[in-house]
Structure formats: structure tokens, C-alpha cells
Image: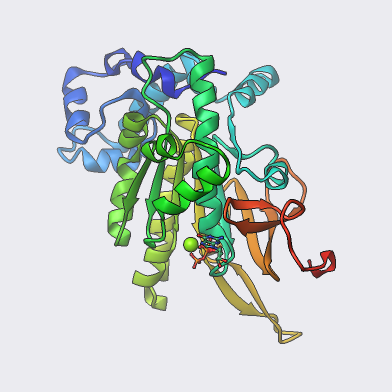
Amino acid sequence: MAHIASRLKEVKMEEIQDITSDMIDKLRKLNINSVYQLAVQIPSELAFEISDSSIDIESAARLVGNARKILTENDLLSKEFSTANDMLEKRNEISRYSTGSSNFDTFLDGGFQTQAVTEIAGEFGSGKSQICQTLCAAAITLMENDRLVENATQKPTESIIFIDTENTFKANRIHQIAEQKDLDPEDILKRIYHCNIYSSEQLEVLIDELPKFIEQYNARIVIIDSIISLHRAEFSGRGTLVERQQKLGRMLNKLRRYAEVYNVAVVITNQVVSYSDGTSGLDYMKAAGGNIVAHGSTYRIFLRKSGKNRVATMEDSPCQPYQRVKFAISESGIQDVSSYKTEESESAW
Ligand code: GTP
Ligand code: MG
């Protein structure tokens, strides 16, 4: 399997068409140090940030376009127009990271996918954080296999970046899940780069700088638990809704670019809002963040509690039908219901 991350250092900034050494210096001052980091920039923001007005939006767009072009020429990024065969090859580059629950993996068509943003929404206690932490334990083993196949002794070890906005990440829980699955907890914990975030602004800055960390840690999965809690708490009044949505949209736009350019799996969790059905008077729950978040993710999974178990529904997917899976949360993280003792009857979906 071709790994984009493994070839990160091979294309030099100097090779980008029409780039000057003066521009490379300016980009470095903005902490843009690689072709990949340039390729994920939003041109209008780049023009704004190079504040000496030496570059307008059109030139910035050309520069970002040229960075993408050189990645495309080196087969590190898909072409704007590609043949169906190219598309098939591109799909072959996708990795899928298992959750350790075979039913849940089938539900995900093999696991959490690179080149995609997967959103997991659900009410408190529905299992969002448990899925993220089980993924941490289960996925690293798959990364190690890739490493062995490619004989990549010079590559930095592949890893997971975990961005925690709710302070609910528990290293000892991942240790427990790994032990229960007969995996090596020490190796797994060494390869998870965890970061606590306390404000919406801090989250936005980190997402801006994420390309640097994806490269530095050779990350294959980026988890954000949760994408919305800080923005929701800080922008609570109606008057701030537009600003909040713009900020969320901007973060998701960046995350989609990173997923594509770096071939990483981005997994985000989302909260719910309740709404009442005017005709029946019943209250329902839906994912928070409105259309901005709905359109910002590739896959949308909605979780709900079902007795002692949980039900996940695939609400949006580019390639899968609407479907559901039942799972349990145990000492070994999330797992198939059939392999887990439950007193609940199957009719309780
Ligand atoms: P919020 O973050 O509050 O919105 O909820 P969440 O959807 O992230 O829920 P989370 O994944 O944290 O927890 C779901 C359920 O998992 C809990 O209600 C517990 O039943 C279970 N759980 C959490 N931690 C553990 C643990 O360490 N061991 C076991 N066996 N179960 C746990
Ligand atoms: Mg949680």
C-alpha cells in the first residue's frame, strides 16, 4: 500500500512552479514549511496572512494550486480530472482502521477510513468517547503491520493524534482495552499524541497548525473529541450563531483538506440538540451544528442508547446504504453484542 506520509519529505518547496526564495522565506515565517502544508492552505487566508500585500488572493490561489500540482505529478495527490482507473487506484490507497468490533467494522465497510472525515454524534453516555478510545487501541496494531510490510525502518513510527476538548481521554482506559485485546499497551500509549484544549480559539489555532503535527508524528488518524463543545459553550446567544457556524465551517473545511492531502482518517465527535415534532408533540434528537457540520463530514454516524447496549445508525455515507448496528461497551471497549452477555432481548432496537 502506498503511503503518502512516508514520502512526505521527498518534494521540496523549491520545486514548486514559479515560487521565489523570497516567498519561501515568507511562508516559513508563517510556519508553512512543506509542500503539503502549502497545499492545504485556503488562498484567501494565505493572502491575508502574508500581510505585506505582496500577494493577492489570485496569486495565493496559484501558489496553492502549484503546490497541489507538484503533489499530483508525484502521484501524492489525486488529479482534478482523473480516469476511472486512477480513481480506483486512489481508492486502493485508502486505509481502514478497525475498531476491534467486527460488526462495527462491517458497518463502517472495514473501519474508519482515511481521506474522510467521520462524525460520531450522540447524547451523553452514548459511546462517542469509548469508540474513539477503542479505535486508539485497535488501530495502532494495524499501523504497525503496514510499517513491517514496507520495511520502513527510517520512517517515523505511525501514530494517532488525539485532541481532547472535554478532558475525558483516559490513558488507563486505553491501557485496559489494549490488555483485554491482548495487544501491547505500552507500544500503543507511546504512539498516541494527546492534547487537552480549553478554548474555541485554542482549538482553531491547533487545527490551523495540525499539518505540522501530522508530519512530525507521522499521524494516520486524527481524533477530535469533541469538535463542537467549546464553540457551543462560548457562542451560545442567537447573535453569535453566524460567527460560530463560520468558525465551525472553517475548521471542517481544513480537516477535509488534511484528510485528503495527508491520507489520514479524521474522526470527530458531535453533540446533539433536541427538537420537537410540531405535529406529534414528541421530542427528538439530532446532531448539533446544523448544515455546516452535516455537509462538512463524509460519514455521519448517530448513536443512541438501547437498554444496556448502543445502536449506531449510518445517516450519511457516500457509498453505503442507510444501516444500523448494535454494539456494547465493556472492559475491552466497544464490542459485538453477540459476543457479549446481555439480558436484553433483540426486540429492543
Ligand atoms: P459525552 O462525552 O458525555 O457526551 O458521552 P459519550 O458519548 O462520549 O459517552 P462515553 O463514550 O464516555 O461513555 C459511554 C458509556 O461507556 C458510559 O455510559 C459507560 O457506560 C461506558 N464506559 C465509560 N467508561 C468505561 C470504562 O472505563 N469501562 C467500561 N466497562 N465502560 C465504560
Ligand atoms: Mg465523550
- Horizontally, residue 90 falls left or right of residue 159, namely right
Tell me: residue 296, above or below residue 123.
above
The residue that appears at 29% across and 61% down in the rendered structure is: 198
| Along the line of sight, the residue nearer the viewer: 307 or 29 | 307
Give the x, y percent position of residue 310.
67, 62
Up the image or down, 28 lies above or below 250; here it is: above
The colour scheme is rainbow
Residue 244 as seen in the image, left or right of residue 349: left
Snapshot quadrant of residue 49: top left
Residue 35 visible:
yes
Q: Residue furthest bottom?
A: 281
Numbered-mark total: 0
Residue 305: image quadrant is bottom right
| Image quarter of the N terminus | top right
Question: Viewed as shown, does residue 236 lie left or right of 136?
Answer: left
Tell me if residue 250 can be seen: no
How far across and down, in percent of the image, does residue 159 sit?
42, 34
Q: Nearer the viewer, residue 87 or 324?
A: 324
In the picture, which quadrant includes the C terminus? bottom right
Point 66% across, 58% down: residue = 328
Provide residue 228's location: percent of width, then percent of height: 44, 62
Q: Residue at x 39, y 75 (%)?
A: 236
Q: Position of residue 89 (x, y in %)?
A: 63, 19
Nearer to the camera, 249 or 234? 234
